[in-house]
Image (tube, grey):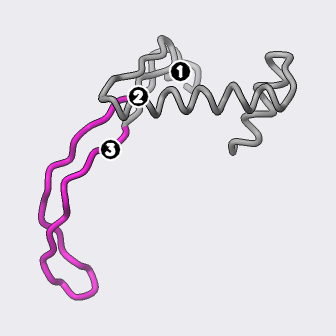
Amino acid sequence: MNKTDLTSAIAAKAGLTKVDAKKALDATLEAITEALKAGDKVALIGFGTFAVSKRDARQGINPQTKAVIEIAAKKQAKFKAGAELEAAIQ
């Protein structure tokens, strides 16, 4: 399912137009992104939790040249599914 399919599904289930559903989805994604940028967690009870984790700098190997390279530290978005979501897909 891509973003267009998700927008259509939201519109059908919520009785909204596709335009309104797209605005709602975009606003939701923007709010989650802003919270993660600020270092906050976003917990949607029953669905899951979005959080940011930090990965330290480390050494890696270039598979073509076998040369040792330095991989920079970075922040990474993570999602952990909630219990209800886990149960629903089993």
The C terminus, quarter of image: top right
What secondary structure is found at the residue carrying circle 2?
A: strand
Q: Earlier in the sequence, mark 3 or mark 2?
A: 2
Callout 3: few (<14), some (14-19), or many (20+) C-alpha neighbours within 10 Å?
few
Residue 11 at what x, y percent from top left? 82, 25
**Closer-to-camera residue (50/33):** 33
Query: Which of the numbered marks, if any, corresponds to residue 50?
Result: 2
Whole-angstrom CA distance, mark 3 to mark 2, is 11 Å
Q: Quadrant of the N terminus?
A: top right
Crowding at mark 1 (Cα within 10 Å: few <14, some 14-19, many 20+)? some
Q: Are marks 1 and 2 in contact (CB under 8 Å)?
A: no
Q: Assign a secondary structure to mark 1.
A: helix
Residue 70, image quadrant: bottom left
Amino acid carrying label 1: it is Leu
Q: Residue at x 75, y 33 (%)?
A: 7
**Part of the protein shown in magenta:** 51-77
Q: Earlier in the sequence, mark 1 or mark 2?
A: 2
The residue that disc 1 covers is 85
Q: Which mark is residue 76?
A: 3
